[in-house]
Amino acid sequence: MRNLAPQVVRQRLLIEGLFDCPVDEARIAGYFETLTRALGLKMYASPMIYSLAGMGRTQNQGYDAFVPLIDSGISAYFWNEARLLSVLIYSCRAFDAEKAAAVAREYFNVAEIESSSF
């Protein structure tokens, strides 16, 4: 992909893993706090966390979450049945991608994890 605005710093990281712990709104909010603190990123508003609450297909039940950062934002998705998490960190400030994956691994007790920067 061609960099259309090289003067704008942009770092993107996708983290996916299979979690082995209970996930609810409080745990997701705590994850955003833990992750942003570990990476030195700052939230400027509270996380927005939504649950499908019985809407849609059973296999897609879980949570969708987003937290705005001073330097962009973090989106996170959790599938209850598959026990899958998918986190996208988009930042206009450089951060440690390995540390971000390690935080997800530890916080959600993830045995299998994949990450990709782009």
Image: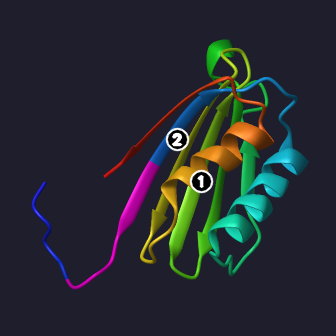
Q: Position of residue 30 (x, y in %)?
A: 84, 56
Amino acid under disc 2: Ile
Q: Position of residue 39 (x, y in %)?
A: 63, 68
Dot 2: element = strand
On screen, 74 above or below 68?
above
- The verdict on residue 8 being magenta is yes
- What colour scheme governs how the chains and residues are painted in the rendered image of this protein? rainbow
For this view, does 11 lie left or right of residue 61? left
Q: Dots 2 and 1: beta carbons under 8 Å?
A: yes
For this view, does 50 lie left or right of residue 26? left
Amino acid under disc 1: Ala
* Residue on which the image places disc 1: 100
Q: Position of residue 27 (x, y in %)?
A: 86, 46
On screen, 22 above or below 103?
above
- The verdict on residue 21 being magenta is no
Circle on res. 15 = 2
For this view, does 69 lie left or right of residue 58? left
